[in-house]
Image (cartoon, rainbow, N blue to C red):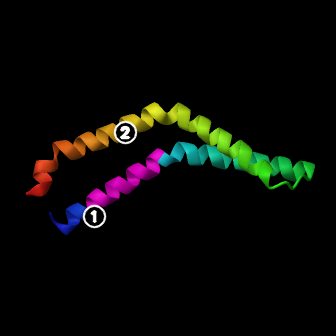
Amino acid sequence: MTPEFVIGYARQSIELALTLALPMLGVGLVVGIFVSVLQAATQIQEQTLTFVPKIVSMFLALLFAFPWIMDKMIDFTRNVFINLPTYIK
């Protein structure tokens, strides 16, 4: 294995991890901004009010995105196992 191969493989792994986290992070961002605007408009400054909607919405986003996430993870893992003999050389 060359250093270029290892760096490329690590880059691919990091890109996959970021891609898989994107649906939950995006939903959390949108809900967080919405709750912040709502808090600013109503002048309610309760800190726990921001966490519960974000946690629930991120969990729902995970439930909806889970088949796609599993498909991406299975493809990546399958690719690793299929190409394992070429990686060892």
Viewport quadrant of the C terminus: bottom left
> In the image, is 43 to the left or to the right of 64?
right
Q: Secondary structure at mark 1?
A: helix
Q: Position of residue 4 (x, y in %)?
A: 22, 65
Q: What amino acid is labelled 2 in the image?
A: Lys
Classify mark 2: residues with Cα within 10 Å, few (<14), some (14-19) or many (20+): some
The question of residue 12 being in magenta is answered with yes
Report the disc number at residue 20: none
Q: CA distance from mark 2 to mark 1?
A: 20 Å
> In the image, is 54 to the left or to the right of 9?
right
**Quick one: which residue is furthest to the left in this view?**
89
Q: Quadrant of residue 79?
A: top left
- Note whether 55 is above or below 60 in the view shown: below
* Residue identifier under label 1: 7
Magenta stretch: helix, strand or loop mostly = helix
Q: Residue at x 16, y 49 (%)?
A: 84
The question of residue 69 being in magenta is answered with no
**Quick one: which residue is furthest to the bottom in this view?**
3
Q: Residue at x 64, y 47 (%)?
A: 28
Q: Residue at x 36, y 41 (%)?
A: 73
Say whether marks 2 and 1 touch (CB < 8 Å).
no
Q: In front: 56, or 43?
A: 56
Q: What amino acid is labelled 1 in the image?
A: Ile
Q: Residue at x 81, y 50 (%)?
A: 37
Report the disc number at residue 72: 2
Viewport quadrant of the N terminus: bottom left
The magenta stretch is 7-20
Q: Position of residue 50 (x, y in %)?
A: 76, 50
